[in-house]
């Protein structure tokens, strides 16, 4: 089994240490020769990197080389895989997105509604530049992108790099939901075989089978409706916000029992309730800054100070394992099944061919091979078409520098709808994003 050279782009992320634990867990299945951290924020990256050096010395001694850099050529030259998890503007801008939306009585969320639009417009340029940098030094590297909002980013990258067959956009939310399904069914998550359709953060599970072909869908619905639904992935299980999110998924199932919903649909189906429960002075971004970020930074600081990771609360998380197992399937042509984003081209027969859909695929060394979904019912098609139009208009606005397209996008978005609110929130977001957004023409 040939060892790979891997780069983590955006290695200053608070998710990086969980991914490092996942690389250790998966080292027999996805062996590495070299690992490189790349980030434009040197000090933030350095904390994770120095802790990782100690962690790997104790748990991954067979790794031949580990390094970290802010130099693009040094990072991307001769690489096999790049995992991307960047956040343009950082958590500080995420907090601005959420506060501004909530000020106008609109959902304040990272990837949905105005927050998703703002984050998407910040992400597109950096993602395009990053892909160009990688392709300059490693034309044949596989790029696996986690950067949010994944739907908007994927649409933009598909326009900019339409012929790049080694660029894959993925999201771990479906598998994080499946971990909870597995717990309810008393099965292993990797033994579940899902059928699913939608856009990123905007989809539904139609069936949940096991590898023996047994259909657990109706039993699962009944158990969730009767007993509730809770997050089980270690990274989110004890997070009150995520607990409430999974509770709301039960209500979605009660209201629309045909399919099992992605948890993010709560923001589009119950926007007024989502706004009512939020505190503009205690945004989700603020909770992450004072919660996960502080916890991870404190762990890294202790590892560096003590010279050991023994006894620290580091664990494998689905964010890392999902990305790594997807890479394994590609690297060694395993043909394993994953829910990823891919251009539609008839997969969902009553949606446009150029739609970036999120559906089950098998991942091979020649790329993803999607399973056909066929026609989807009118209600779900209508919801998806509205969301798709919003996403396309946001990307149009980026490439055309169009204020009008952004206003149209927000007016279409189910979290906004009202034109006056759309204009007000857009103008406020323009004010704080001047450093990151393209100059818009009215």
Image: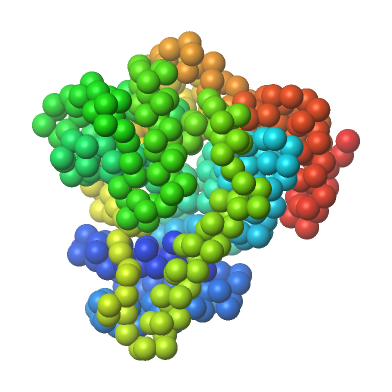
Among the 4 quarters of the image, the one containing residue 388: top right
Query: Measuring 20% from the left and 24% from the top, which residue is drawn there?
Result: 219
Find residue 193 and report its horizontal and vertical position in percent: 23, 34
Q: Residue at x 78, y 25 (%)?
A: 419
Tell me if 227 is positioned left or right of 366 in this view: left
Residue 436 in the figure: left or right of residue 216 = right
Above or below — where is 250 with respect to 323? above
Q: Residue at x 50, y 31 (%)?
A: 266
Given the current orientation, which residue lies at the most extreme top position?
A: 378
Count of residue discs: 0
- Residue 121 vertical placement versus 12 (above, below): above
Q: How is the image coloured?
A: rainbow
Q: Is residue 61 visible?
A: yes
Query: Of 14 and 11, which appears nearest the observer?
Result: 14
Q: Nearer the viewer, residue 436 or 365?
A: 436
Check the picture and name the quadrant holding the C terminus.
top right
Image spot of residue 88 (x, y percent):
63, 57
Residue 352 visible somewhere in the drawing:
no
Residue 290, quarter of picture: bottom right
Identify the residue at horizontal 38%, vertical 82% (top origin).
303
Q: Quadrant of the N terminus?
A: bottom left
- Position of 40 with respect to 140 (left or right) is right
Q: Most extreme residue toward the bottom, as rendered?
A: 306
Quarter where residue 73 is shown: bottom right
In this picture, is 179 found above or below 292?
A: above
Residue 41: x and y in percent read 60, 72
Image spot of residue 261 (x, y percent): 40, 28
In the rendered image, the residue lying farthest to the right is 442
Q: Is residue 107 left or right of residue 184?
A: right
């Amino acid at each position: 089994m040939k060892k790979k050279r891997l780069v983590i782009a955006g290695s200053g992320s608070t998710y990086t240490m969980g991914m490092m634990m996942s690389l250790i867990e998966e080292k027999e299945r996805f062996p590495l020769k070299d690992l490189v951290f790349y980030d434009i924020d040197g000090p933030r990256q350095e904390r994770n990197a120095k802790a990782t050096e100690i962690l790997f010395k104790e748990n991954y001694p067979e790794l031949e080389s580990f390094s970290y850099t802010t130099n693009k050529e040094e990072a991307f030259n001769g690489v096999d895989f790049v995992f991307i998890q960047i956040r343009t503007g950082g958590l500080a801008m995420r907090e601005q997105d959420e506060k501004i939306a909530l000020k106008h009585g609109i959902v304040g969320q990272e990837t949905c509604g105005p927050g998703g639009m703002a984050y998407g417009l910040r992400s597109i340029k950096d993602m395009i530049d990053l892909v160009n940098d990688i392709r300059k030094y490693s034309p044949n590297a596989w790029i696996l992108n986690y950067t949010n909002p994944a739907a908007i980013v994927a649409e933009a990258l598909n326009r900019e790099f339409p012929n790049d067959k080694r660029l894959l956009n993925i999201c771990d939310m479906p598998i994080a939901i499946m971990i909870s399904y597995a717990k309810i069914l008393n099965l292993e998550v990797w033994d579940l075989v899902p059928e699913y359709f939608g856009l990123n953060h905007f989809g539904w599970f139609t069936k949940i089978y096991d590898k023996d072909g047994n259909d657990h869908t109706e039993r699962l619905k009944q158990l969730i409706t009767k007993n509730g639904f809770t997050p089980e992935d270690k990274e989110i299980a004890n997070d009150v916000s995520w607990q409430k999110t999974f509770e709301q998924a039960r209500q979605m199932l009660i209201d629309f029992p045909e399919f099992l919903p992605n948890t993010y649909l709560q923001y589009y189906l119950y926007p007024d309730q989502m706004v009512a429960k939020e505190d503009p002075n205690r945004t989700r971004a603020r909770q992450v800054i004072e919660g996960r970020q502080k916890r991870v930074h404190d762990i890294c600081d202790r590892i560096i100070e003590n010279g050991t990771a023994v006894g620290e609360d580091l664990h494998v998380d689905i964010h890392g394992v999902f990305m790594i197992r997807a890479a394994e399937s590609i690297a060694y042509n395993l043909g394993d099944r994953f829910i990823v984003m891919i251009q539609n081209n008839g997969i969902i027969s009553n949606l446009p061919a150029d739609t970036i859909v999120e559906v089950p695929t098998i991942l091979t060394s020649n790329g993803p091979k999607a399973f056909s979904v066929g026609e989807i019912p009118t209600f779900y098609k209508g919801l998806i078409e509205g969301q798709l139009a919003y996403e396309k208009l946001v990307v149009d606005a980026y490439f055309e520098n169009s204020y009008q397209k952004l206003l149209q996008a927000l007016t279409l978005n189910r979290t906004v709808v009202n034109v006056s609110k759309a204009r007000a929130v857009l103008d406020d977001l323009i004010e704080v994003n001047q450093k990151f957004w393209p100059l818009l023409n009215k």
